[in-house]
Image (cartoon, rainbow, N blue to C red):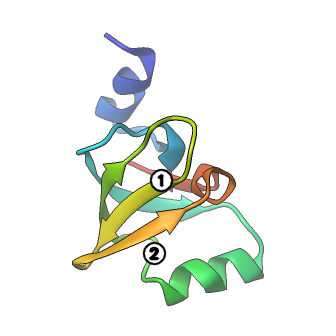
Amino acid sequence: MNPHHRRIHGGAAVPLVMVDRGRKMRIHAIHGGHGLQGRLNAMGLVPGMEIEVVRNDHGGPLIVEVLGTRLMLGRGMAHKILVC
């Protein structure tokens, strides 16, 4: 088993960049300043919100779906979003 899967299944929060395509996760926390938190909030990405990873090629931007809308996130931004 992939060590990243153990952490995800174990309930511990992990950065969004570590989540494989097709997984539904809940945002646990956002580690960033007010600017980043405000930008993510405007997109509906807030703690407690369920999201689905639509694309994660582990090298380019991620695409997530939230409330029926697909959003593209840079890897730096996605690294600051903790999910479980």
**Residue 21 falls in which quadrant of the image?**
top left
Amino acid type, label 2: Leu
Residue at the farthest top position: 1
Crowd tier of the residue under label 2, counting other residues whose Cα lies within 10 Å: few below 14, some 14–19, many 20 or above = many
Residues tagged 2 and 1 counted as in contact (Cβ below 8 A)? no
Going by the image, does 26 lie left or right of 27? left
For residue 72, above or below residue 15:
below
Mark toward the start of the polypeptide (2 vs 1): 2
How many numbered tags mark residues here? 2
Q: Residue 43: x and y, percent?
A: 47, 83
Q: Residue 22: x and y, percent?
A: 23, 45
For residue 33, above or below residue 56:
below
Going by the image, does 12 lie left or right of 34? left
**At 75% from the left edge and 82% from the top edge, which residue is drawn?**
35
Look at mark 2 in the image and give the residue it sits on: 45
**At 52% from the left edge and 52% from the top edge, which residue is drawn?**
82
Q: Mark 1: which secondary structure?
A: strand
Amino acid type, label 1: Leu
Name the quarter where the N terminus is drawn: top left
**At 36% from the left edge and 49% from the top edge, which residue is drawn?**
55
Going by the image, does 79 lie left or right of 63? right
Q: Residue 63: x and y, percent?
A: 41, 59
Look at mark 1 in the image and give the residue it sits on: 62
Q: Residue 12: x and y, percent?
A: 43, 38
Mark 2 to mark 1 CA distance (whole Å): 14 Å
Q: Mark 2: which secondary structure?
A: loop
For residue 25, above or below residue 36:
above
**At 35% from the left edge and 38% from the top edge, which residue is drawn?**
11
For residue 73, above or below residue 82:
below
Residue depth check, mark 2 versus mark 1: number of the one nearer the observer: 1
